[in-house]
Image (tube, rainbow, N blue to C red):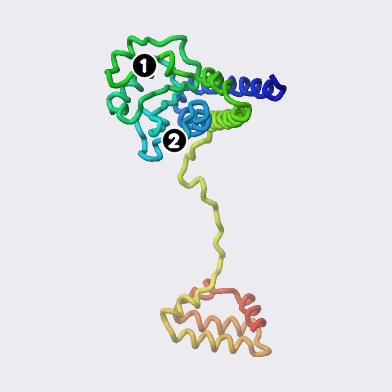
Amino acid sequence: MGMRQLEVENELRGVVSRIIVQVELATSQGRTDINLALEDASIPILRSVYNLPRLINPNRKQKNYPGIDLGDDHDRVSFQVTSTTSLDKVNFTIGQFMERSYFNTFDELNILMLARKQPSYSQASVDTLLTDQFSFNCKKHIIDLTGLLGLVAGLRLAARERALAQFELILGEVDAFISYSNSSVAAPMSITSNLQKIRLPLRFGLPNLVSTRRPSLNAQRRNFLTKIKRKGAGRSSRRRCFSRVCRPTLGPTATTACLPSTTWSKVASRR
């Protein structure tokens, strides 16, 4: 055996062992939905090991395809991917398969367990769910990642390297899933928690707004600007002129609601 083959085998064992540990950690925390993150990631490996080039996720054809996670309706092979390893899960999966008559589309059902499967499963319990139309062998059709790794070992070196890359991707998916599940972000306690306090100016201009109500103010404003541009017009005269423009419409407090005279001085100097 070459050095590269040895390296790939050691790396495969290491990565698969870490995946199993992480999946078991997630399931111990009640996160049995971790399989949802790994269904598509396992497709390339299963395609190579089982020689199923048309294996897909049937949820892409029909949302929430019950009882089956992956399937190849050309070679008539299906998979259920799960992190639950109990006999009840096996019976439930087979019961769904039979109830929905999936045997009309698939000749074979495999249950891929992402955690370590139990040493044995009751074939007699499974047989009570089967008919002459379909058969299921617990020893053959229930496989975990360790068993899948044994099948990968029978592939050519190039295929094993591709499987290694895919297992590393699966490990990344598991790590990301666990990190996201364990992240705790405090929920906002108030609907105004994202608002910012702002300060309004003490004085602001209104001539443009009131001119839409009284068109004659446009002419008054033009006259006002003409007067303040005259040379020698002092601050007091500008204020008196501006007061005459605003007060007829805005009332006696108009001068406090308009721009200060220093601002209008700057405006006049730019015109």
Q: Percent position (x, y) of residue 158?
A: 62, 30
Disc sitting over residue 27 in the figure: none
In this view, the mark in front (2 or 1): 2
Residue 31 lies, in percent from the top left, at 47, 25
Residue positioned most to the right = 3
Task: Look at 35% across and 28% down and name the residue there.
Answer: 106
Measuring 36% from the left and 17% from the top, which residue is drawn there?
A: 136
Q: Position of residue 95 (x, y in %)?
A: 31, 21
Q: What kind of element bears circle 1?
A: helix
Q: CA distance from mark 2 to mark 1?
A: 26 Å
Side (left or right) of 260 relative to 214: right
Q: Residue type at mark 1?
A: Asp
Q: Residue 56's mark?
A: 2
Would residue 182 be seen by someone viewing this image from the given angle?
Answer: no
Q: Residue at x 68, y 90 (%)?
A: 231
Q: Which residue is mark 1?
A: 88
Which residue is more in the foreground, 50 or 270? 50
First in sequence: mark 2 vs mark 1? 2
